[in-house]
Image (cartoon, rainbow, N blue to C red):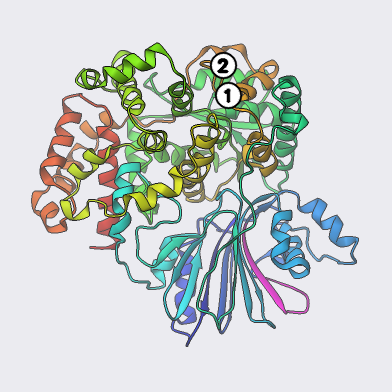
Amino acid sequence: MCGILGACFFTEDTIKEEKFHEALYTLRSRGPDAQGLFYSYPVILGQTRLSIIDTSEKAHQPFWSTDKRYVIVFNGEIFNFQELKQELIQQGISFKTHSDTEVLLHLLILYKENAIPKLNGFFAFAFYDTQKNELIFARDRFGVKPLWIYQDTDKILFSSELKALIALGIPREINYRHLWAYFQLNYFPPNTSVLKNCFKFKSGHYAIINPDVNQVEQHPYYTVPKPDFTNIHVSKQDYAQQQQYLAQLLEDAVQKRLIADVPLGVFLSGGIDSSVITALAAKHQKHLLTFSIGFDNPVYDETEYALAVAKKCGTEHTVFKVSYQDLLDNVFNVLDYLDEPFADASALNFYILSKYTRKKVTVALSGDGADEVMGGYMKHLGEYKARQKTRLNFLLKTFNPVLKHIPANRNSRFTRKIWQIQKYSKGLNQDIAERYWHWCSVLTDTERNALLQSSFHPQNRHEITQEYMHYIHAHTGIQDVLYADMHLTLQGDMLTKVDLMSMANSLEVRTPFLDYRVVDFAFQLPSESKIYGNYRKRIVQDTFRNILPPELYHRKKQGFEVPLRDFFTKELKSYIHKELLDKDWILEQGIFDFNALQNLYHTIEQGKNGKEDWTLWAVLVFNYWYKKYIR
C-alpha cells in the first residue's frame, strides 16, 4: 500500500523537481516507510511506500526493469501475484524480489494493457516505457484505491490524493457545477471533483498516454456482469449449490488476503459481514487479532456481538471504547486530512478505529462491499417491496400527503420508524429512477435548494443523476439498484471513507467481498437469493449461519453512526456559533442561505432531529475545507 504521484508534460517542464518532493511529502501517511522519485522529462513518477509484501529495500519504488527501459509506481496489492509469478517463471523470467510490484512490472512488459484483467486485487498504477515514451494508467475494478487526475493544455498530473496536486500548484477553483451534488449526497459522486480541471479516474479503466497527444482517453477493461441464469451455480432451483459456491469463493478470497510480511488483523464490528470475514480468516490463521470500537451510549454500541463472534472463533479481540472526548480529540485530525469535502460522519469512527488498530497491525481485513453486492441496505429492501403491488403500498402512496405532516425524527425507535415510513411513501409516488436517487440522497431537491443561494441551484442535475439512474429498470428485481450502488454509493462514499481514514493512519484495509470473482458470482444470482420477504443479504446469512453465533441473527442491522446531535449541542457548540453561524462570514462567502443555517441548528438544538445533523456536518466539513484551501 502506497501513495503515488506523477506528471506527463506536453510542452515544457513547468514544475521543478523540488516541488514534486514537497508534494510527495503530503502523501507520507500513505507510505511512511520509503519515498522515491523518478524524474526524466517528459515524465515524472513518485511513490511513498507502506511496506507490506517484501519489506526489503530491493522492492522500493519507483521500480525499474533490469534493462532500465521500464519503470512503475504502484499503489495497492495483487493478491494472486504468486500464481502470476509462476506463470512468468515458466516463460523464463527471473525475479530479484518477492514483491507483487515486480510481478506487475513483468506482466505489463509482456502484455501491456492486456495484463490488467489478470490482476486480482486493488490498485492504481502508472507504468512508463522510456523507449516508446508511453505511459499506462489503470485503476482497480471497483475503485478501492483512488487515482486523481488534473489536466490542462501543458500537462497531466496524477496522484493518490488531491492534496498532492494542490501542493504542485494547480488552480484552486471550485467546480460549482457539482457543488449541489455534495450537499444532496454528502459526498462528491465518482468521476466528479470539488475543483475544476480535476477528476477521479474511472474504476475498471485504463489509459495509454503519449506526451505528444494531450488527452486522457479512458478505456474499460472490466464491467460488473449482468445476470446469467444459465450458470449452474446461480440456478433459481439450486439455492444450496449457490451457497456452497459462495462459501468456496469467499473463503479463497479471504485466504488470499491473509498474505503479508507484517502483522495482520480483522475489523470485527459484530455485524454479519465482518463476522463472516473473521470466521473464515480464523480458519487459516492462528491467534487472529480482531478489533472493534464501542460507545458509552448503548444506542450506538454493538461490541457485545463482536465479543460473541470473537469467542466463537477464538480470536484475540480488542475493544476500543470511544467517548465524546475521543471524538472531539480526533475531529480536527479528520477535517485536516480531507482534501475534498466528504461528509459521511462515520468517517470519524473509522478514523479512530484505524488509529488504534494501527498500533498493533499494519493490515486489516473488513466486510466492506457486502451490502452493495448482496443487498444489505434498507433501501434495497424498500425497493424490493416498492415493486410489489400490495394493499399497503396503495395506502401509503395514497396517504403520503397526510403522512408527511406527522412529526418524525431519529431520536427514538418510534419516531425513526415514522421517518422511514415517510421516506418510503414518498418514494412510492416517484418513478423507479427518481426513487433511487431520492433514497440515496440526504436532502431532497427542495431542501438542498433552500440551503444554498439561488445561484448554486443545479443547472446540470439530470446530467449527473442520469449517469447512475440509467441503470434502473422495472423488470430486473433489485439487481439494477445494486448495480447502480456499485457505481455511486460504494465508490463515492464507502470505499472513499475506508481509504482516506485508514491511509491517514498508515493502515492497509483489504475487502474480500470485493474480490472480483465474488462480485461476478453475486451479480449472476437471482434477486431472491439476496432479498426474500424481509430477509436482506439472504445468501450470506444462510451460507455462514453454522459458523456464526445465533444471536447475530436476532438483532437489527446497526449503522456505524456518530452521535452528532449531542456532539453539536455540547462539545462543538461554540465552534459552530463561531464558524458556521457568523452572518458576516456567510454573506461574504456567498454560498449558503444564512437563515437556513440558523434554522438548521435551531432544529437540532430543539431535538427535532431527522437528518439535520448530517446536513450540518456537511456544511461544517465544507467550510473547514473552504477556509483551508480556498479562502
Residue tagged by mark 2?
552
Find out whether the residues at labels 1 and 2 contact each other: C-beta distance under 8 Å: yes
> Residue at left 18%, top 55%?
455
Q: Is residue 11 above or below residue 136?
A: below
> Going by the picture, which residue comes out furthest to the left?
584
Residue 124 in sight here: yes
Q: Is residue 368 above or below residue 383?
A: below
Q: Position of residue 320 (x, y in %)?
A: 48, 30
> Residue at left 53%, top 57%?
202
Which quadrant of the view contains residue 359?
A: top right
- In magenta stretch: residue 398: no
Image quarter where the C terminus lies is: bottom left
Sequence-wise, the earlier of marks 1 and 2 is 1
Magenta stretch, main secondary structure, is strand
In this view, the residue in front, 438 or 589, is 438
Q: Say what secondary structure mark 2 lies in.
A: helix
Residue 416 in sight here: no
What's the magenta region? 63-75
Q: Is residue 249 above or below residue 382?
A: below
> Going by the picture, which residue comes out furthest to the bottom?
12
Residue tagged by mark 1?
272
> Residue at left 78%, top 62%?
97
Q: Position of residue 389 (x, y in %)?
A: 44, 18
Going by the numbered disc 1, the residue's amino acid type is Ile
Give the Cα separation between the discs numbered 1 and 2. Answer: 7 Å
In this view, the residue in front, 631 or 395, is 395
- In magenta stretch: residue 73: yes
**On the picture, is 265 further left or further right than 564?**
right
Q: Position of residue 217 (x, y in %)?
A: 54, 68
Going by the numbered disc 2, the residue's amino acid type is Leu
